[in-house]
Image: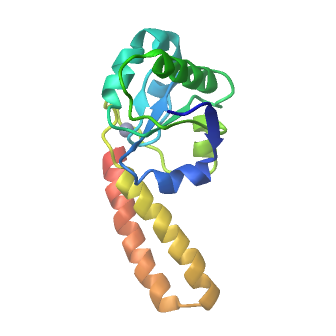
Amino acid sequence: MARGVSYISAAQLVPMLRDPRIAVVDVRDEERIYDAHIAGSHHYASDSFGERLPELAQATKGKETLVFHCALSKVRGPSCAQMYLDYLSEADEDSDVKNIIVLERGFNGWELSGRPVCRCKDAPCKDYRVAIYALWSLQHIKNRVSHFGGSAIMLLCGSINSVAVNITSRHVN
Ligand SMILES: [Zn+2]
């Protein structure tokens, strides 16, 4: 079990999202309804967070890493992460959770840095993290290939990219 809450950046979180043992927990309040969210994230609003701790434990059974965030991850995200850490430390039952992490700069930072978001109304959000990871990988490939000027490979990446965008936007709409 984690001893303390640690922090990661959005850039570090993206490749982690392909790991099924990771859950993202959004603790924003009503703004989640108006704004978008990270695909696949759970929603446990900070104003009722304390009452829903057992529910969160149930919903994230088997997960090893929980990544908390609010809008900026200044107050609500870190305090809910700490509250959950305390809850797990005091609970008698064994938990699979090994890491409790806060996403730096929160959802706003994630969105402002151009990371893909989901606008579905599903609660909890259905998990389209694979599509996000595919987009991220392509971005990486394109960046590398451009160093060598491989225009044919760029073309191929472009077409795969548009397929991935289609997959993502279908879920986003
Ligand atoms: Zn969604």
What residue is drawn where x is 32% and y is 44%?
A: 127
Q: Quarter-wise, where is residue 93 in the image?
A: top left
Q: Which of 7 and 98 is in front in this view?
A: 98
What residue is drawn where x is 62% and y is 30%?
A: 4
Q: Is residue 127 above or below residue 35?
A: below
At which x and y percent is residue 1? 50, 33
Q: Is residue 114 visible?
A: no
**In this image, 63 relative to 47: left or right?**
left
Q: Which of 79 and 27 is in front in this view?
A: 79
Q: Quarter-wise, where is residue 52 in the image?
A: top left
Quadrant where the C terminus sits is: top left
Q: Which of 144 and 95 is in front in this view?
A: 95
At which x and y percent is residue 14? 51, 53
Q: Can residue 91 be seen in this view?
A: yes
What residue is drawn where x is 56% and y is 32%?
A: 69
**In this image, 150 relative to 43: left or right?**
right
Q: Is residue 4 above or below residue 144?
A: above
What residue is drawn where x is 56% and y is 21%?
A: 80
Q: Which residue lies furthest to the right in this view?
A: 74
- Which quadrant does ligand 1 occupy? top left
At which x and y percent is residue 27? 51, 24
